[in-house]
Structures are given as structure tokens and as C-alpha cells.
């Protein structure tokens, strides 16, 4: 559910929210904060070199979670002659405080050209020459992935010195041949101001893995409004920002997903707003501190934001995508009555098995993580497909960490922006290309 893309700044969608939720000043305040955060994100100046000069030492800034789940930290060195030494440290716990094995992968990498799969990324040729595995427990569990497919896609953002490397496939068996179409959480340069996690990871070696401090468990509380921290990329050449609002007392949620054609989210293509219900399940057995949820999407509105998408949606007129027929640029249509939108591949009602986790950024702001979508574009619509890793975090849109009671105004239905199955967006985008 939440995996898609959220967010909407569009006039129409905002006014919908205001109508529904307008009577609650706390929520309005949060939404305004979300709104201004998003405005800053859209079209933000980001300096990127293609191909990038990645010479240097790059390290994880936190304990990372890969599908499985696998818990790891990374410490990668790239030399001027094109060779690299990639250290990966694996752990038994989601704090990365109990190391289980270390992997040293040597090889060479040559950035080539702009990626055809991910606009704004660089495709690189990678050659692995040597792999060394060091077991720190009696058994190396899990046996790590020894390929370096992640280096075939990279993006270096100079402003914050962040190196984004390609994603790993959510199915382990697919990893060694996977062509990345999205990114993992970025590595940071170990050059400057490297303290805390950065310092611990950058000074480790194959035989002395970094041991991160165990963190107190942060309770998962969804209540309130949350927004993307950056322009996010989804497999299939999709860029988006998300804004999600949860009402714990009524167990309803709304989501707004603004889609863009470019990697800094400057050129909007369409927006989706969705809403529905959710229910909290058990604490995750796989990832300590995470909590299972189920989500349903019951209402959805679609707003075409450029001429190509308007044209595409109009071609579906009268065929299971909105009752009114013709689509107009910037004008939202409710697609609930047609059980979704065939052009987007979205069917309502839709149910998803989710995983949430709470976090905190370096400045102490609350972060919320929800599950990564399957790499094959399918939907986590069965319990066994529940995610075991996370999307980029959302940040809470308020200054203070208080939980305020919140209520939908009387008589208003849950009118929200939901999430779409990722596959839906893929269908649309592929058609556009
Ligand atoms: C890349 O950056 C390194 C230092 O960060 C520098 O020594 C090297 O000359 C640069 N390479 C190119 C091709 O600009
Ligand atoms: C490239 O440079 C690194 C570090 O200076 C060195 O260890 C490695 O042997 C060099 N590789 C080649 C192929 O020259």
C-alpha cells in the first residue's frame, strides 16, 4: 500500500483534504508543514556528475536492512585506477551489534554512461576478481550474496556527498543477475566529519567488523502526517514524493503520491490520492522493533499532470477508469466507482501486507519506514509476500513529538489518497515511454 508513491501538492487534492479534514487545526498544521517540505523537495537543486568520480572511501551511515532480512554495514573503497575493495559486514540483529560474517570483494568498476533504466543514474561495468568470506560465528548465516550488481548503477550527489548504489533484488535467487532499477540507502563519504556510525564503520576491517551500539526500541506509532525526505525513485523510471496521514483512532489512512518524470521531482506527470483502512498486527518476528500491519485501499482519485498522461487516460475513457469519461489536465477524477483504473492496473478494494518501523534522523526527527515492494513489480497481497526490508523513510511533519487526538469531521467519508500497487504505475509509465 504505502509503497507507491505518495504525495500531492496539487491544488485539487489539497482542497479535497481540506474539505474532509478541515475542522482539525492540528492536522491542518501538520499538512501545511508537509506541504512546505514538499515544495522544497520538488525541483531542488542537486549537483550530479555523469559519470561520477567515485574515488574515495564510502561507508554506511546506519545499520542497513536488505530483503531476507539481512542486516549489514558497508565500507567501500574506490581507487583512481578503477579498482575497488568492498567490505560488507553482516549481523544477526537489526542494530548491527552482533556481527556474524564479513565479506571482502575486490574488483574493478568503470562508470560508462547515463543509465537507460534510471534517469539520472550512471551505468557501470563491474568485474569481480576476488571474494573473501570471514565467518565470525560457527556458521555463516545467512550466506551472503557475493555479486556486486549494485555497482552497475550509481548516482553521486555532491551537495551532501552521498553515493547511491543500485538496489538488490528482493528475491535472493535473482540477485546475481539483477539489473538494478532503484537505489539502496546512500553511502556517505568517510572523508569529512566522520563521527559516530561513520567512524565505527570506516575504521573496521575484514577481521574487525564494526559493532554498532544497540538502540533502545522505538515504538511504532503511525498517528499524524508523514512526508518523503527526498525525491524517491521506483523501479520502472518512476520518481515520486509521498505524503501519508494516519488516524489511529479510526484506523483510516490517506496517501498522496505525486509522480514526476525527472530525478529531482520537478516535472509532474500525475498524482494519486488514495484512502482506506488499516489494522495493526503482531510485532515482526523477522525484524525486532518492526510491526506488521494490513492495509486496504478503498478510495482513489487520479489527477493527470501533464499532456501525455492526460492523453493516455483519455484513451481509456469509459473503460474502467473513472466514471466521467474525459480527462483534463490538473483535474482529479474519482476512480473508486469503477473499482480502480485499468490504465494504472489498480483494482479496488486492494489489500496489502505491510511492515513498519520507527526511526530517527541525526537531528532527532521521527522517521517512519514502510515495506519495500517486491522487485518483480508484484504486490504484497499475501502474508508470505510481506516485505522484510524498507523503503526510504518518511519524516513526521510536525515540530513536536506529541500525539494529538484527531478526528474526521462528521459526515465525511474516508477520502484519502492511497497507495497504488507498484505494478500499476509501471504499466502506466511503460505505456508512456
Ligand atoms: C577524482 O577525485 C580524486 C580525489 O577525490 C582525484 O584525486 C582524482 O584526480 C579525480 N579524478 C578525476 C578523473 O577527476
Ligand atoms: C590500483 O590501486 C590500488 C591502490 O593504490 C592497488 O592496491 C591496486 O593494486 C591497483 N590495481 C591495479 C590493477 O593496478
Image: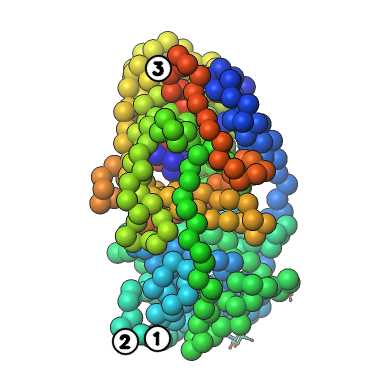
Q: SS at mark 3?
A: loop
Report ligand 2 position as a quadrant: bottom right
Could you tell me which residue is drawn at 53 percent across and 55 percent down? 359
Q: Indicate whether 33 appears above or below 11.
A: below
Colour option used: rainbow
Q: Which residue is mark 3?
A: 322
Label located before the other in sequence (1 or 3): 1
Image-based side of 266 in relation to 249, left or right? right
Q: Quadrant of residue 290?
A: bottom left
Q: CA distance from mark 1 to mark 3?
A: 57 Å
Circle 2/circle 1 CB separation < 8 Å: no
Residue 87's label in the rendered image is none
Image-based side of 388 in relation to 301, left or right? left
Q: Position of residue 340 (x, y in %)?
A: 36, 24
Q: Which class describes the residues within 10 Å of circle 2: few (<14), some (14-19), or many (20+)? A: few
Q: Which residue is mark 2?
A: 138
Q: CA distance from mark 2 to mark 3?
A: 59 Å
Point out the frontmost of discs 1 and 3. 1
Q: Quadrant of residue 382?
A: top left
Could you tell me which residue is drawn at 32 percent across and 46 percent down? 281
Along the viewing direction, whichever of 298 and 22 lies nearer the viewer: 22
Q: CA distance from mark 2 to mark 1?
A: 7 Å
Q: Indicate whether 96 appears above or below 373.
A: below
Could you tell me which residue is drawn at 53 percent across and 62 percent down? 165
In which quadrant will I find the N terminus?
top left
Amino acid at each position: 500500500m504505502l509503497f507507491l508513491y505518495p504525495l500531492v501538492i496539487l491544488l485539487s487534492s489539497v482542497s479535497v483534504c481540506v474539505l474532509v479534514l478541515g475542522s482539525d487545526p492540528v492536522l491542518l498544521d501538520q499538512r501545511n508543514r508537509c506541504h512546505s517540505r514538499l515544495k522544497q523537495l520538488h525541483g531542488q537543486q542537486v549537483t550530479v556528475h555523469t559519470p561520477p568520480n567515485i574515488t574515495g572511501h564510502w561507508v554506511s551511515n546506519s545499520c542497513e536492512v536488505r530483503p531476507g532480512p539481512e542486516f549489514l554495514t558497508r565500507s567501500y573503497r574506490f581507487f583512481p585506477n578503477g579498482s575497488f575493495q568492498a567490505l560488507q559486514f553482516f549481523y544477526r540483529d537489526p542494530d548491527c551489534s552482533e556481527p556474524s560474517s564479513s565479506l571482502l570483494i575486490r574488483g574493478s568498476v568503470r562508470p560508462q554512461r547515463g543509465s537507460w533504466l534510471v534517469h539520472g543514474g550512471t551505468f557501470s561495468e563491474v568485474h569481480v576478481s576476488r571474494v573473501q568470506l570471514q565467518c565470525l560465528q560457527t556458521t555463516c548465516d545467512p550466506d551472503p550474496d557475493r555479486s556486486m550488481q549494485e555497482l552497475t548503477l550509481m548516482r553521486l550527489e555532491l551537495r551532501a556527498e552521498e553515493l547511491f548504489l543500485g538496489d538488490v533484488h528482493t528475491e535472493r535467487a535473482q540477485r546475481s543477475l539483477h539489473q538494478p532499477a532503484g537505489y539502496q540507502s546512500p553511502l556517505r563519504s568517510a572523508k569529512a566529519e566522520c563521527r559516530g556510525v561513520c567512524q565505527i564503520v570506516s575504521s573496521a576491517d575484514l577481521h574487525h567488523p564494526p559493532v554498532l551500539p544497540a538502540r533502545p526500541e522505538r515504538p511504532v506509532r503511525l498517528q499524524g502526517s508523514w512526508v518523503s525526505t527526498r525525491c524517491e525513485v521506483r523501479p520502472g523510471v518512476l520518481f515520486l514524493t509521498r505524503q501519508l496521514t494516519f488516524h489511529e483512532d479510526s484506523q483510516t489512512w490517506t496517501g498522496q503520491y505525486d509522480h514526476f518524470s525527472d530525478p529531482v521531482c520537478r516535472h509532474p506527470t500525475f498524482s494519486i490520492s488514495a484512502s482506506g483502512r488499516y489494522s495493526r498486527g503482531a510485532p515482526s518476528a523477522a525484524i525486532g522493533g518492526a510491526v506488521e500491519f494490513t492495509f486496504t485501499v478503498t478510495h482513489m482519485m487520479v489527477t493527470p499532470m501533464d499532456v501525455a498522461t492526460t492523453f493516455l487516460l483519455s484513451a481509456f475513457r469509459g473503460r474502467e477508469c473513472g466514471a466521467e469519461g474525459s480527462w483534463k489536465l490538473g483535474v482529479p477524477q474519482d476512480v473508486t466507482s469503477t473499482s480502480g483504473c485499468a490504465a494504472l492496473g489498480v483494482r479496488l478494494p486492494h489489500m496489502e501486507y505491510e511492515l513498519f518501523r520507527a526511526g530517527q534522523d541525526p537531528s532527532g526527527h521521527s522517521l517512519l519506514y514502510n515495506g519495500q515492494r517486491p522487485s518483480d513489480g508484484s504486490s504484497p497481497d499475501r502474508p508470505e509476500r510481506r516485505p522484510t526490508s524498507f523503503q526510504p523513510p518518511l519524516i513526521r511533519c510536525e515540530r513536536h513529538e506529541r500525539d494529538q487526538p484527531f478526528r474526521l469531521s462528521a459526515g465525511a467519508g474516508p477520502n484519502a489518497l492511497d497507495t497504488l500497487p507498484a505494478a500499476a504505475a509501471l504499466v502506466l509509465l511503460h505505456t508512456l515511454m
